[in-house]
Amino acid sequence: MEEILGNREKFSQEVQGQVSDYIENMGFQIISFTLQEIKDSNGYIESLGKPQIATVRQEAQIAEANANREVRIKKASAEQEATKAELERETEIADAQKEKSLKMADYQKQQEVAKADAKKAAMLAQKGKDIAEQEQNIAIQAKEADLKRKQYEAESNTKADADLYVAKQSAEAEKARQIAQAEAQAEQIKLQAEGGSRADSAGRVGPSREHGEAG
C-alpha cells in the first residue's frame, strides 16, 4: 500500500500491463489509463497518511515558524535598517543645516566686512573729497592773493609811473619857467642896455647941434 501510494505511476503501468492482454482478447485496446482514486474499507490508507499528515503539519508549522522567524528577523533588520537610514538622514539633515548655518554666518560676516569696507571707502572718499576741496580752496585763495598782489603791483607801478611823469612834467615846467625867466631877465637887461646906449647917444648929439647952431 505504501508503494502504491508512493508511486502511483508505476502501479498504473503494472495494472495496465496485466489487463492489456485480457482486454485485447476481448477485442478492446487500452488507449489511456488513469488511476483516479485508491480506497480501502478499513481506513488503512487514512491511518497510513496520518503520520505523513502530522509530519507535513509539523514541517509546515516548523516552516511557518521559521518563516515567521525569518519574517521577524527581516522585519527587525528592516526596522533597524530603516532606523539607521533615518538616523543617517537626520544626521545628514543636521549636517546640512549646520553647513547652511555656517555658510549663512560666513555670508553675513562677509556682508558685514563688505559694508564696513564700503563705509570705510566712503569715509576715505569723503575725506579725500574734503581734502581736494580744501586744496582747491587754498589754490583759489592763493590765485586770488597772487592776483591781488599783481593788481597792487600794477597799481603801484602805475602810481609810480604817474608820479614820475608828474615829476618830469614839473621839472620840465620848472626848467621852462626858469629858462623863460632867464630869457626875460636877459631881454630886460638887453633892453635896459639898449636904453642906456640910446640915452648916451642922445646926450652926445645935442651939444653938437647946439654948437652948430651957434656957429
Image (spheres, grey):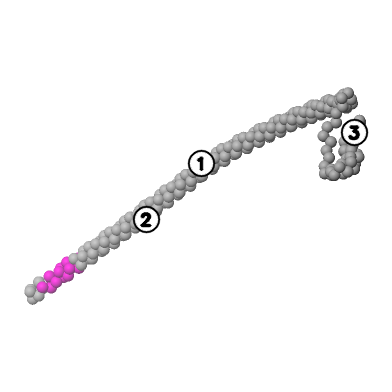
Describe the element under mark 3 as helix, strand or loop. helix
Check contact, mark 1 vs mark 2: CB within 8 A: no
Q: Indicate which label's residue lies in the foreground, 1 or 3.
A: 3
Q: Indicate which label's residue lies in the foreground, 1 or 2.
A: 1
Q: Is residue 198 visible?
A: yes
Give the mark, 1 or 3, whose residue is nearer the N terminus.
3
In the displayed structure, does residue 188 sit left or right of residue 8? Answer: left
Could you tell me which residue is drawn at 85 percent across and 28 percent down? 39
Q: Is residue 94 above or below residue 167?
A: above
Between residues 209 and 27, which one lies in front from this camera angle? 27
Where is mark 1, residue-wise?
Answer: 130
As measured in the structure, the alpha-carbon distance from the residue carrying label 3 to the one carrying label 2 is: 163 Å
Q: Amino acid at mark 2?
A: Asp
As measured in the structure, the alpha-carbon distance from the residue carrying label 1 to the one carrying label 3 is: 121 Å
Residue 108 picture location, percent across and down: 62, 35
Could you tell me which residue is drawn at 26 percent across and 61 percent down? 180
Describe the element under mark 1 as helix, strand or loop. helix
Where is mark 3, residue-wise?
Answer: 4
Q: Amino acid at mark 1?
A: Asp
Where is mark 2, residue-wise?
Answer: 161
Quarter of the N terminus within the rendering: top right
